[in-house]
Image (spheres, rainbow, N blue to C red):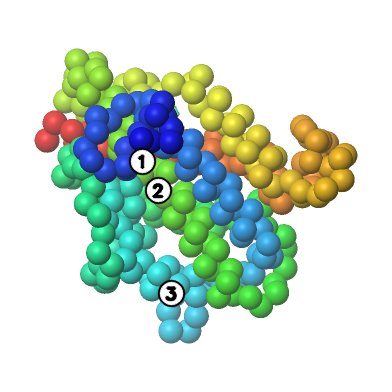
Amino acid sequence: LSPHPTRRRAMDAGGGEQLSLAAVRDQLIREEDSIVFALIERAKRPRNTPAYSAAAAGGSLAEFFVREAQAGHYQKPEDVPFFSQDLPPPVFPTKGHPKVLHPFASSVCVNDAIWKMYFNELLPLFTADGDDGNYAETVALDFACLQALSRRIHCGKYVAEVKFKDAPQDYSPPIRAKDTNALMNLLTFTAVEEKVKKRVEKKARIFGQNVTLEDSVGKQDGDACDSHCKVDPKVLSKLYDLWVMPLTKDVEVEYLLRHLD
Ligand SMILES: C=C(O[C@@H]1C=C(C(=O)O)C=C[C@H]1O)C(=O)O
């Protein structure tokens, strides 16, 4: 018996169960935890910019690390490599996943945009200025952030698939007309986005507080404790507002545009 008989099965649970928008959204909510924790972990280290400047032999330490660390990942449609050339073959046996997406799903990828956003925009918002020399650890933490963000954003493929399956009559005309704006409007749910922003901000406030055994600490809520949080909760709502949700929707549109090919 499942310990959570009423819990909706996530779409990567295997076994070929039917996808539903509710189940995909549950998966996205779970991915929020991974993103918040990955950022909290990365915030332990200062900016450490030398890890990102190109070494003489070409490429930065961050790039080198991500290329090497890719081995054994990327068996699932939502796990997309950052450097797809020279990707080593899988080294671990992996469980198959139900084929619910179109075969072209694997070519839908916004990792270049995620990479640029992460290093140019996001990192300065949640890391302290400084250099402590721990570059190898730093880039490993960056990789965890990048992967969590990428996985969440590429789950947009599943979102698009269920939205199409639920209303093919609405989605087919703009897909045939290659009407990107109409598709974007159809798949956008503003009320859901507002909730997502509030929830990630709240998660950053809860997960990022210092937990002590004294009564007064840990009970604070709202802006009062934000300056003590390991990552400013407002950074999370901004991250989702400006980049995570728009990129997820770009994935949705890119996937839908080719749905009738
Ligand atoms: C992911 C969805 O599609 C869109 C993108 C959202 C997101 O990235 O969180 C939220 C609502 C929609 O505007 C969804 O409907 O759940």
Question: Which residue is farthest front?
Answer: 1
Residue type marked 2? Arg
Residue type marked 1? Cys
Image position, residue 46 (x, y; %): 69, 65
Above or below 57: residue 71: above
Q: 100 or 194: which is nearer to us?
A: 100
Is the distance from the Cβ of mark 1 to the nearest ligand 1 atom less than 8 Å? yes
Local packing at callout 1 (Cα closer than 10 Å; few below 14, some 14-19, many 20+) is many
**Could you tell me how far apart the alpha carbons at marks 1 and 3 are, in whole angstroms?**
26 Å
Question: Which residue is farthest left?
Answer: 261
Question: Which residue is farthest bottom?
Answer: 57
**Could you tell me how far apart the alpha carbons at marks 1 and 2 are, in whole angstroms?**
6 Å
Above or below 30: residue 160: above
Task: Look at the numbered discs 2 and 3 and tell me whether their residues touch, using CB distance below 8 Å.
Answer: no
**Residue 184 shows in the view:** no
Task: Look at the numbered discs 1 and 2 and tell me whether their residues touch, using CB distance below 8 Å.
Answer: yes
In the image, 59: left or right of 253?
A: right
Residue type marked 3? Phe
Element carrying mark 3: helix
**Residue 111 shows in the view:** yes
Image position, residue 79 (x, y; %): 34, 52
In the image, 54: left or right of 168?
A: right
> At x 43% / y 84%, what residue is drawn?
57
